[in-house]
Amino acid sequence: MTSSTVQQPTRPSARRRWFGWRPDQQSEAYLFLLPSFLGFFIFVALPVLASLGLSFVEWNLIRPPEFVGLTNYRQLLTRDPVFWKVIWNTVYFIVTIVPLQLALGLAIAVALNQAIRGMLAYRVIYFMPVVTTIVAGAIVFQFMLSRDFGIISRLIWDFGAWSGLGIQPPDFLGSTRWSKPSVVMLTIWKMWALPWSSTWRRCKGCRKNSTMRPMWTAPARGSASATSPGR
């Protein structure tokens, strides 16, 4: 009987076992991400930390700051009626915007997860609102939703006159009832391509993996190999 020969796989280095990435091989990626990190740190992280520090002091920009502890928070929670209205508006936007954005992004990603001609053009068109400034988007929506000259209001006027129902368009921009839905529509239009992009990439990865040969049908590179005993 011949003896079995077993070749043990080499143990990966500790640097490669950290979630499968090596910092020395991804220096270019970090270099490209550096402007975004700097912008986030300067315009988001630092102001948030500064606001958190100022919330514990009383300061009128003339006299030196005076530490007051939790007094500002106590007054905010007990004596400021606007605070709870702001909380309600925040909850309203979270409950409406987040599910609608995710649902729209998932639906478009599934619909475009096919071999469609001109896919690059579709991706550029769908991603245009993200790179468009919020000011330009607000101006476009103002022209669309204006009660006097907006295209949506005009369509509602024409439909009311054509059907004889006398339907009049609501004041999307000046009414307290319709102002928040208008902001929701603008926000969804501005940012819905982000969940679509991530979902589309995952769908494409799943589609690619489903057409690949199963890993267990062939020995992996570097795996242990053994010879069966002969008789």
Image: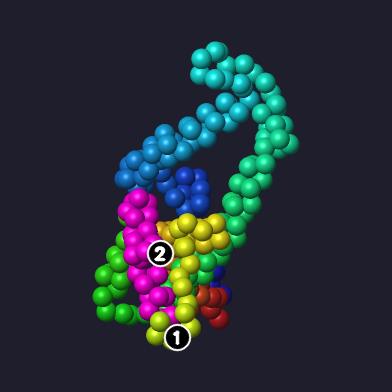
- Residue 87: give x, y in percent of width and height: 63, 48
Q: Is residue 59 above or below residue 50?
A: above
| Label 2 to label 1: alpha-carbon separation | 20 Å
- Residue 48: give x, y in percent of width and height: 52, 35
Question: Which residue is disc 1 drawn over?
Answer: 164
What amino acid type is highlighted by mark number 2? Arg
Q: Is residue 216 left or right of residue 95?
A: left
- Residue 215: give x, y in percent of width and height: 48, 73
Question: Which residue is disc 2 drawn over?
Answer: 147
Question: In front: 202, or 151?
Answer: 151
For the point 55% across and 13% down, the residue is 64
For the point 43% across and 80% down, the residue is 160
Q: Is residue 137 above or below residue 86?
A: below
On whether residue 137 falls in the magenta region, the answer is yes
For the point 40% across and 64% down, the residue is 147
Residue 54 makes an appearance in the image: yes
User: Which class describes the residues within 10 Å of circle 2: few (<14), some (14-19), or many (20+)?
Assistant: many
* Tag of residue 141: none
Q: Nearer the observer, disc 2 or disc 1?
A: 1
Question: In front: 30, or 48?
Answer: 48
User: Where is the N terminus found, in terms of image quarters?
Assistant: bottom right
* Helix, strand or loop for disc 2: loop
Residue span colored magenta: 133-160
